Amino acid sequence: VRHVLTERAAWQGERDIVGADGVPCVAVQTLTPVSGEAGEPARVVCVLQDVTERRRQDEKLRRMARLDLLTNLPNRAALEESVDRAVRAAREGEPSALLLLDLDHFNVVNEALGHAVGDRVLVAVASLLSECLDDRHVLARWGGDEFAVVLRGVAADEAVRVTEELQARVSDYRFDLGFEAVALGLSAGVALVDGALEGREVLALADTALYEAKERGSGRVVVLDSSDDARRSEIARTGQWVRRIRDALRHDRLAVHYQPVVDLARGVPVHAEALVRMLNERGGLIPPGEFVPLAERHGLMTAVDRWVLDHVVQHLERHPSRRLFVNLSGTGLEDDGHLGAVEERVRRALIRPSQLVFEVTETAALRDFQRARRWMERLSDLGCGFALDDFGTGFCTFSYLRRLPVDYVKIDRSFVSSVRRDRGDEAMVRAIVAVARAMDKRVIAEGVEDAETAEALTAMGVDLGQGFLWGRPGQAFVEA
Ligand code: C2E
Ligand code: CA
Ligand code: CA
């Protein structure tokens, strides 16, 4: 007040005060000097404005940007900062561990019972996990059904102990789904934070650990640390490949090659299979074997398949008498949005849908039989054909074949190449032909490399053939 009077200048500041009702609040206080009649500083007017509510809103917004709204846990962005802090602390001598946790079979619950039930399960898991952890550790929602924990000040054995405790806690719990209670497992990937890696790398390491844990089954834990040099370079390599695939998609550095499908009785090419290649920066070809598995693991294969489909549709629009076989990745089958997009592309295409035949491997189809059947039914409804690829390498159960609406069965190369030498393989081919015939399906033999094999297959009643004998996959569609 003295300052305001002597300087004749207003003052403003924020103060924590207690209201008459005893409730603490935040106020903005403004002091303004008022002059007397002779112009001398006489009084000060004080105005207090209650801004408690406004401050609370600001704070809420700030927190929301860093909080997961469903579980109220810190979100991905907040966790990344915690990991960076843990890395800095590790460099000062305090080690820690990063856990990535993934609920096993959560998608089954989510799909069978709906997202509302799924959400309830996630909230329950969040509170189970937080009950097991003390305050110095940070529990966050990593996204979907994944959680993350930064365990501060722990070494490897302690990190594993806590992880196993969390796993036991979740697997012992019965989630009430309304009509029954189920148990869920928790898979864990642990990365030890010793300061050698950057935060980003620690996250990638934990992600690799989690991936390996899930590969081994449910409820497993895998621990990795920075000293595992081979793994580190593998992570770096994987990262490079993922970037290359993304770039290739973005810059159209993909190509479709065509391999003729030959009518064995007449010995002439009638259709073709579309096979994708990636182009490197210098235009060189990268075969699918080098990038398809990685693209599948990193969720990029649906985009690749759609790129190929788009390309193939444009080809068929220009050539209305041709028929092309297109591969669908097994991982894409799990994605209903992908199915919708594929259907939509076919609907928009100015082709006869029967010009398109989709291929799904036997293994992928049997991994989730109902789902594979839905894909087949929906695309067959549009008029497209379906082929079961690599037949014989999966379960090869003929009873499944009867229940799948496929038009073609493609016998895998491994049987075809030795059909003249190996009586077991010959019997397999004969059996597949007999069963397929009885079910009105056509048979394609893959990987035919010599004329004698082609003759033998024709004699066994195989309808169509594909292989280096007639041509390797190339840029041109070969016609009779
Ligand atoms: P696939 O669908 O079984 O394709 C047949 C593979 O066998 C092709 O390899 C082809 O070049 C090769 N092949 C054909 N005839 C012969 C032969 O006589 N002898 C031998 N030794 N090999 C033969 P490619 O083009 O390297 O493709 C490999 C795999 O990559 C494909 O196996 C398929 O699973 C996948 N793939 C290719 N293009 C796509 C695509 O657009 N989408 C998806 N999801 N997968 C694709
Ligand atoms: Ca194929
Ligand atoms: Ca095949």
Image (spheres, rainbow, N blue to C red):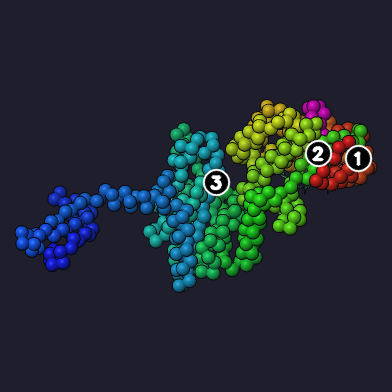
For the residue marked with disc 2, what is the amino acid?
Ala
Q: In the rendered image, which quarter contains the N terminus?
A: bottom left
User: Is residue 306 shown in magenta?
Assistant: no
Q: Are the two marked residues, 1 and 2, in contact with CB atoms closer than 8 angstroms?
A: no
Magenta-drawn segment: 435-443
Work out whether mark 1 precedes mark 2 in sequence or the reverse, and give the earlier one: 2
Label 1 to label 2: alpha-carbon separation:
17 Å
In the rendering, at what x and y percent does residue 15 appear?
Answer: 21, 58
Please state if 154 lies on the left or on the right of 390 as rendered.
left
> Can you name the residue that lies furthest to the left here?
37
Tell me the mark number nearer the camera, choosing from 3 and 1.
1
Residue bearing mark 3: 104
Residue depicted at 89% across the width and 44% down the height: 469
User: Is residue 440 shown in magenta?
Assistant: yes
- Residue 432 seen in render: no
Numbered label attached to residue 272:
2
Residue depicted at 68% across the width and 27% down the height: 381
Please state if 25 lies on the left or on the right of 61 as rendered.
left
Numbered label attached to residue 242:
none
For the residue marked with disc 3, what is the amino acid?
Asp
> Can you name the residue that lies furthest to the bottom here?
92
Graded by Cα atoms within 10 Å as few (under 14), some (14 to 19) or many (20 or more), the crowding at tag 1 reads: many
Label 3 to label 1: alpha-carbon separation:
47 Å
Quarter of the view holding residue 2: bottom left
In the rendering, at what x and y percent does residue 23 appear?
Answer: 19, 51
Please state if 185 lies on the left or on the right of 23 as rendered.
right
Residue bearing mark 1: 454
Work out whether mark 3 precedes mark 1 in sequence or the reverse, and give the earlier one: 3
Judge by depth and name the residue closer to the eye, 151 or 405.
Answer: 405
Judge by depth and name the residue closer to the eye, 144 or 471.
Answer: 471
Tell me the mark number nearer the camera, choosing from 1 and 2.
2
Under circle 3, the secondary element is loop
